[in-house]
Amino acid sequence: MPQPLTYQPQGDALALDGGVRVEWQGMRSAMLDRAVVRFASRLAILSGRDAAPGGQGGLILRIDCASPDPGLLSVHMREHYRLRTGPEGATLVADGPAGVLRGLSTLLQLVEQPDTGPVLDGAIIDDGPRFAWRGLLVDVSRHFMSVTALERQLDMMELTRLNVLHLHLSDGQGFRVESRLFPRLQQVAGPGRYYTRQQVRALVDYASDRGIRIVPEFDAPGHSYAMLRAYPQYAARPVTTPMDPKRVVRAALDPSNPQVYVFLAQLYHEMAGLFPDACFHVGGDEVRPDEWTTNPKISAFMKQHGYADAPALQAAFTQRVQAILAHEGKTMMGWDELIQAPVPASIVIEPWRGSRYTAQATAAGHPVVVSAGYYLDLLLPAVEHYRVDPLDPQGNGLPPEQVAQAHAPFLEAFALDPTARMTPAQDRLVMGAEAALWTEIVTEEMLDGRLWPRAAALAERFWSPASVRDENSLAARLPMIQSELEKLGNRATADRQHMMERLAPHGKAPLATLLSVTSPVRNYALNHVFGPGRVTPTENPPPLDRVADIATPDSFVAAAFVRDVRAYLAGRHDLAAGLRARLEDWRDNDARLRQVAQVDAGVNDALPASALLAQLAQAGLDTLDGTRTAWPAGGPAALATAQNQFAASRSILAVRSTPQPAGDLLQDITPGIVALVQAGRGGR
Ligand code: TNX
């Protein structure tokens, strides 16, 4: 994952007995040498055999890199490669260094571990990306993420062939880069909660080494409360210190103040020097009109210049900012609100509110990077995002009803529009897409689990041909890629274990069992901005340590159960014993968890979900045992409850009007129990 463009298995595998010997043909560079060192140490981990480069014997790896690639680290970088593996070793041919990196990541995925010892599968692969821009957005303002945490994500991105890290560096909760010109910016963030200039340079180098661009975002004129706490003279309405949770998402710059543009020109100049990428993201989302219109000075300014409304005023602001960035030699990028009034077509637009904005922006000639449909903080299972294509609705070749189905979780509030139409010329303006993680409810210890493996599924959506969309195959490969990523540094499981130990120091096993088959409520039911919310922004955010913060959107254990139920109902009666054992474990887990709750109060939150799981398990057991005709009154009620809980967070709008289950957990074995019960009713 991501699946290559073409892949021919060659049967004969090569035993990995330790060591890698590289034979260079074509060009070689320090960057490629470091890539090979990383490859060798990863190969050693995955194969369990020591594989220091330069050793004797072992895997012979021929690398033929044609050119240094003048477009390296731009949207034009050459990522194509050809790979052949067999008894004679591996041959990797690429047009440029990025192609070598992508080929090495694929090579690692050919490592298998059968009982007879580690092998490299034989294969002939010809591969290149569908989209040039395959991004991951991490919001480091709402919750600061350490350099180490970001480096780890860059490693995961290299392994899954993502190539842009979009850092949301400034928002209400903090400005996260050291500024020499405006040091109050980092003082507001607080010690240790911003990146020093040296750290930024090192991070950019770390990413470049992995063929990954870093695109910085400094959000303006809205989402700028942190900037304005540092420099209140630029605010449209008074901004106070300490942090006022009600103002955090609202505060905006004053576009009628000429000094604001002087400030931005200086700040962007300084930041442009730190971030070498050609693109510079200036946000532009969610400006609340009354931040401007209720200020008499600003409304007089609007009258004087003939700006009819806030979007017209924002367009004027955007044009001035674009001129500032053009002066820095940067391509401006911003959210889809920028096109509410006409702005220069060279501005790269990032549609986030829906595919209709992809259609609108490309119709106006803007290059586009799509994040609509890819918001990982909605806490949807991987497949829900995987179904959405960056070129939806047209470019994915699906019949309209399937497009509508793919968009269903996002409809209403996020307005994905399956009826919007794009021409081939518009399709060509779509440079790619980004998976996005906003971090209002994500702390650093949750970061790996909230990103992975779902970001890997999206890496495939953005890299592989549109025709790669088999959902069963995705479900089968997700646990595999996650386990591989964890061997290579991903902390998702390890951090979840820590969080469980903190909640249940006297015994986390029953909690782990419950959380292996439940997932958090969806669609911002836990986000204070959209949903009823449980987290308000504060100066020193506490850890998020409720059970729903530990639960993951994809529970592999539940998925395997549902799969086995379907196979059992299709005739695999040998699966019955295994199904029964699992159902008994889930039923009996409730008593064990209740015992833990006597001493570890943090677990109380999970008891209603635990009781419901026990009831569902009992209902499943009753049908398996053939006692379904006399099944307890609780069975159907439990099923109805579990199904209603899913309905309560089926969309952002549903979340606003429907109470969520206690503990905010959903029962992922539900479809399996439904199938069992329905088959039972049918008199099987
Ligand atoms: C909207 S997405 C935002 C973000 C929030 C997100 C979730 C976008 C361009 N703006 O600032 O984090 O919703 O609350």
Image: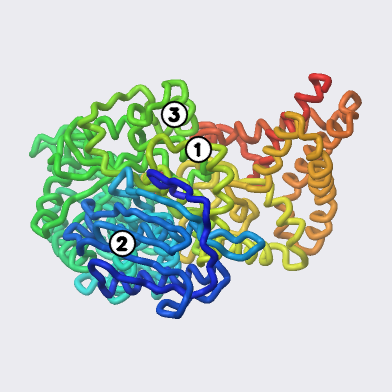
How many other residues sit within 10 Å of disc 3, few (<14), some (14-19) or many (≥20)?
some
Report whether residue 140 is seen. Answer: no
Distance from disc 1 to disc 2, alpha carbons, whole Å, reads 28 Å
Residue farthest along the bottom direction in this orientation: 55
Circle 1/circle 2 CB separation < 8 Å: no
Q: Secondary structure at mark 2?
A: loop
Residue at (19%, 57%) from the top-left corner? 71
Residue topped by disc 3: 412
* Residue to which mark 2 is pinned: 211
132 relative to 244, above or below:
above
Q: Residues within 10 Å of mark 2 (few under 14, many from 20)?
A: many
Identify the amino acid type marked 3. Glu
Disc 3 Cβ-to-ligand 1 distance below 8 Å = no
Whether residue 118 is visible here, answered yes or no, is yes
Q: Quadrant of residue 472?
A: top right
Residue at mark 2 to residue at mark 3: CA–CA distance: 37 Å
Residue 678 at x, y = what percent? 75, 24
| Kind of residue indicated by mark 2 | Gly
Q: What label sits on residue 384 in the rendered view? A: 1
Question: Quadrant of the rendered structure where residue 106 is?
Answer: bottom left
Type of the residue with mark 1: Glu
Q: How is the image coloured?
A: rainbow
Secondary structure of residue under mark 1: helix
- Callout 1 crowding tier (Cα within 10 Å): few <14, some 14–19, many ≥20: some
- Image x and y of residue 503, in percent: 68, 62
Q: Secondary structure at mark 3?
A: loop
Q: Residue at x 12, y 41 (%)?
A: 344
